[in-house]
Image (tube, grey):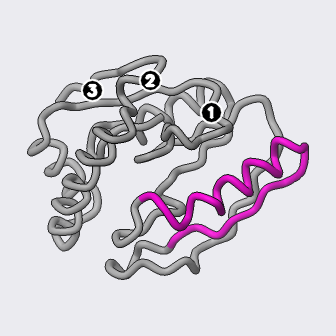
Amino acid sequence: MDGPSGAGKSTFARNLAAELDAQLISTDHFATWDDPTTKWWPRLQNALDEVARGNEGRYRKTDWSQGFPCVEQGDEVILTPQRTIILEGFSSARKANTRLSLAIFVDHEDERERLERAVARDGEHQREHFVRWQQYERGWFAVDETKARADYVVTSSS
């Protein structure tokens, strides 16, 4: 479940996970303001690889509570092998995701409204981080062609 910040993908993913009795993992557990997509990806892949082998996968969440810079000292998460795992968040449906079975892109085309949603959710003190994040997202989605490769595109409303 991929898409830009403030588009509604987390809400959609939580509802779908509840409906399917699926485990939900968020890329927010890994990303940081200064590393939205790169250095952390192998940690996620390693955890998913363990689950694919029938073992528990483990990782530590990124602690976003102190703002910038984020540090990787949050709670430990244990993934268990099960029928459905939903990976939700920015860059989750990237071309490099070797464990992806189905990609859903959640979109909301009004970037200004998405910014306000994100700021309302996480606080005014995060606004400048989200402005930079949205710039990064535009470039990432253009190069990765995430929306074009998605199996489904869901457009959220106001």
Q: Nearer the viewer, mark 2 or mark 3?
A: 2
- In the rendered image, which residue does mark 1 sit on? 100
Mark 3 vs 1, N-terminal side? 1
Do tag 3 and tag 1 residues touch (Cβ < 8 Å)? no
Mark 2 vs 3, N-terminal side? 2
Q: Amino acid at mark 2?
A: Ala
Residue at left offset 62%, top offset 33%: 100
Mark 2 vs 1, N-terminal side? 1
**Quarter of image, res 8:** top left
Q: Residues within 10 Å of mark 2 (few under 14, many from 20)?
A: some
Q: Nearer the viewer, residue 114 or 95?
A: 95
Indicate the secondary structure of the residue bearing disc 3.
loop
x, y (%) of residue 39?
52, 67
Mark 2 and mark 3: span between their CA atoms?
16 Å
x, y (%) of residue 124?
16, 67
* Residue 120 in the figure: left or right of residue 99: left
- In the rendered image, which residue does mark 2 sit on? 150
147 is within the stretch colored magenta:
no
Which numbered marker is on residue 138?
A: none
Q: With respect to residue 40, does 67 lie above or below? A: below
Q: Quadrant of the C terminus?
A: top left
Highlighted magenta segment, given as a residue range = 37-62
* Residue 58 in the figure: left or right of residue 11: right
Q: With respect to residue 129, does 66 lie above or below? A: below
x, y (%) of residue 136?
26, 55
Q: Amino acid at mark 3?
A: Ser
